[in-house]
Amino acid sequence: MNKTSTIATVSALFALSPFALGCDYPQRADIPNGGTASKDDMLAGQSSVKAYMAAMDEYLRCIEQQEKDLLAEMTDISEDERANRNAALTKKHNAAVEEMELIAARFNEEVRAYKAKAE
């Protein structure tokens, strides 16, 4: 990377720093223990998981828009750097989706435990 593109990159990062603050990674959902939880606890857990999923969807939209905006500001970016940035965004996206799937699976396990307790 030459000096001009480095300066442009740093300038773009400073100019867009407020966007970075807008993409906060959501706090994990509170999932109750299905083996000991009450119906109200399970309903609260369901609400927590739904809110978490919505927040994660917003986070994903935010990081994608943030990267799009940043790339629009970076006029002197090499194809290698563009590919590296895209790969990093893809990793962040995939990690977030994987965590969403884990949270959903964990909650479903607790729902099965809750239902088994009720039988």
Image: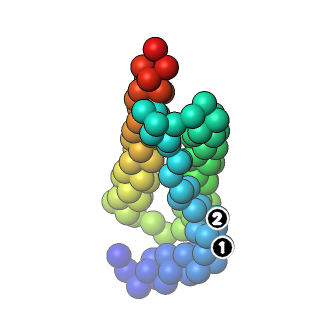
Nearest the camera: 81 or 96? 96
Q: Which numbered disc, 1 or 2, marks the residue closer to the eye?
A: 2
Q: Position of residue 36 (x, y in %)?
A: 46, 36
**Quadrant hosting residue 15:** bottom right
Nearest the camera: 44 or 88? 44
Q: Type of residue at label 2?
A: Gly
Query: Which residue is disc 2 drawn over?
Result: 22
User: In the image, is 9 to the left or to the right of 91?
Assistant: right
Q: Position of residue 112 (x, y in %)?
A: 43, 23
Residue 18 - label: 1
Mark 1 neighbour class, 10 Å CA radius: few under 14, some 14 to 19, many 20 or more = few
Q: Position of residue 23 (x, y in %)?
A: 59, 61
Q: Are marks 1 and 2 in contact (CB under 8 Å)?
A: yes
Q: Type of residue at label 1?
A: Pro
Q: Secondary structure at mark 2?
A: helix
Q: Residue visible at 45% across and 66% down?
A: 77
Mark 2 neighbour class, 10 Å CA radius: few under 14, some 14 to 19, many 20 or more = few
Relative to 19, say whether 96 is above or below.
above
Relative to 25, say whether 50 is above or below.
above
Inter-mark Cα distance, 1 to 2: 7 Å
